[in-house]
Image: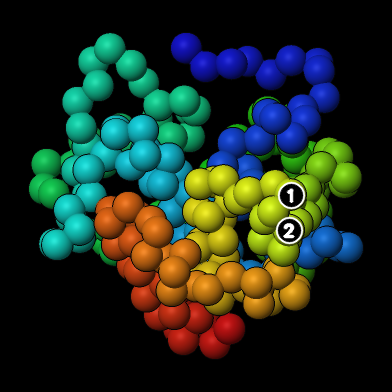
Amino acid sequence: MYAISSPRKPGADDLEFVDEVYFSLLDEHSFALTVTGGIASLGLAAAVLTDLIGDQFLHLDAAEGKLQALGAADRCPRSALAHTVWETIAAQHAVLAVSDWLRYWAADDFATRAAERMVYRGLLTRSERRRRFSRDTVDYDPVDRTLAPWPLVRLRRRLTQPHQERPTSRDLHLYCILTALDLTGRLGDAAHAVDTSRAHAALPQPLRTLFDQLRAAAGAAALTTGT
C-alpha cells in the first residue's frame, strides 16, 4: 500500500510536507529541535492535517472548528503517518474540535511518531544514549545534512525572490505553520518580505481555521512550559 524504503538516498523530491516541517524545526548547525517536543508535535500534526484537508480526507468546519473524517473507500492517504491520523479521527464517534485533536497529538508525542517514520524512510538516524542516573534519551539526526536545511533555504529564497521562483501552496503552508509557532525568526530577512495578514487571507478558510487553532494551542503550550 505504501512505498517501502529503498537503498536509494532520499532527495528533496522525496520529502513529504511533514518532513519539511520537521527539518524546518531543526537548528541548522546542531540539527537539534529548536522547540519543545510539545510545540514540535503541534506543528507536525498540523502539517499532516493540512495534507489530509487538502486531499479531502478530512473536513474542517470553519465556523465551529470541528474536524470530521470523510469516507474514501477507493483511495487512501499518501503516507502511513497520514493514514494513522485519518483512521484515528474516523474511529472517534464524536466529532471533536481541531483544537482538541491538536492537544491530543501534542500529549501523545506526535513528534516522535513523525521522527520514527522518517527513520524508516531513511531521512533520519536514531541513536539511544543510556544514562546511569536519569532516563535514557533518544536522538534523531538527519542522514543527509545538506538536505535537512533545504526546506528553509527554499522558502527564504522564494519569499525574497518571487519574481524568479514563485512560492507554491506548500511554501505558503510552511510559512503559516512557522508563523503560528512564532518561529518566523527562522526565516531571517525573508520574514520581512511577507505580509502575514495577506498570506493568511490567501488560504482556504479551513486552513485559516487550522492555523488559527495551531497558533492558539502553541501559545497555550508555551505559557505552560515557560518557553
- Towards the viewer: 123 or 47: 47
Amino acid type shown at disc 1:
Gln
Q: Secondary structure at mark 2?
A: loop
Q: Which numbered dot is residue 86?
A: none
Q: Residue at x 41, y 47 (%)?
A: 50
Q: Residue at x 47, y 25 (%)?
A: 78
- Please indicate whether residue 212 sits to the left or right of residue 106 in the image: left
Task: Work out whether residue 123 can be spotted.
Answer: yes
Give the number of callouts: 2
Which residue matches tag 2?
A: 161
Task: Answer whether labels 2 and 1 touch (C-beta < 8 Å).
Answer: yes
For the residues labelled 2 and 1, the Cα–Cα distance comes to 6 Å
- Towards the viewer: 38 or 169: 169
Q: Which numbered dot is residue 164?
A: 1
Q: Relative to 26, does residue 23 appear above or below in the rendering?
A: above
Residue 37, position as x, y percentages in the image: 58, 64
Amino acid type shown at disc 2:
Gln
Label 1 Cα crowd, 10 Å radius (few <14 / some 14-19 / many 20+): few
Q: Relative to 92, does residue 108 appear above or below in the rendering?
A: below
